[in-house]
Amino acid sequence: MDDDKLLGLVLLCIPLSLVSFGGGQTIVASLQHQTVDVQHLLTSRQFTDLYAISRASPGPSTLIVALIGWGISGFWGAVIATLAIFIPSSALICIFGRWWQQHRLSPWGRAVERGLTPIAVGLIVAGGLAVSQSAGLSLFEIATTLAAAAFLTLTRVGPYPVLGTVGALYFCLSAAGKI
């Protein structure tokens, strides 16, 4: 067990947990920066792989934290990292959740929600960009992603047909040796 690395991950997770407004996806950019660039717990490729596994698995997007903890210290690393990411935000909700529900429709409560919404959207976009950088996407892959996003935004087609189409396109291009 690498106690210093696990302690670094725990000390990273606690504040991220407290500012994860909008869900776990909002902390991905900070998590990537801290684990890859600052603490050197992972390489960019490892982070991208763990992110892909966490997104393909059922459960919250913060599952990546458990995977990072597992990589550092095995089973107990996963348990400790998971507790570090979930307990602070859960405690915050338990302490202030009822009070917030009573005041969220007040003028200042609405102002707070309106102010936090673009911040959450910006953090989610930053997380997507951080993962894209870690993955080292090519121009073709970036163009494909943007085209798929535009198609999903401008049409009523669900994401699964788009994913299937793009997957088939990449399979054909790979089989033909074009990518």
Image (spheres, helix red, strand yellow):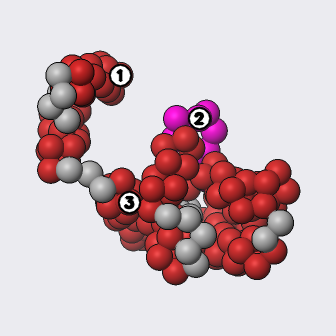
Up the image or down, 50 lies above or below 148; here it is below
Q: Which is more toward the observer, 105 or 115?
A: 115
Asked if the magenta segment contains residue 84, the reply would be: no
Q: Secondary structure at mark 1?
A: helix
Q: Position of residue 73 (x, y in %)?
A: 78, 61
- Residue 158 falls in image quadrant: top left
Going 20% across and 50% down the picture, which residue do you hit?
Answer: 138
What is the x, y in percent for residue 15? 64, 76
Q: Secondary structure at mark 2?
A: loop
Tell me which amino acid carries mark 3.
Ser
Residue type indicated by callout 1: Tyr
Q: Would residue 125 be seen by someone viewing this image from the given angle?
A: no
Mark 3, residue position:
134
Among the two numbered marks 3 and 2 on one chain, the one whose residue lies closer to the N terminus: 2
The N terminus lies in quadrant: bottom right
Crowding at dot 3, Cα within 10 Å, few <14 / some 14-19 / many 20+, comes out as some
Q: Which residues are magenta?
A: 55-62
Near-viewer residue (21 or 5): 5
Picture coordinates of residue 90, whole percent (x, y)? 74, 60
Please tell me whether mark 1 or mark 3 is closer to you in this view: 3
First reached walking from the N terminus: tag 1 or tag 3: 3
Front tag of 3 and 2: 3
Residue occupied by mark 2: 57
Image position of 122 (left or right of 31) = left
User: What's under tag 2, amino acid-wise?
Assistant: Ser
SS label for mark 3:
helix
- Please report contact status of discs 1 and 2: CB closer than 8 Å, yes or no: no
Residue tagged 1? 160
Q: Assess disc 1: are there few (<14), some (14-19) or many (≥20) residues with their C-alpha within 10 Å of its C-alpha.
A: few
**Left or right placement of residue 32 versus residue 153 in this view:** right
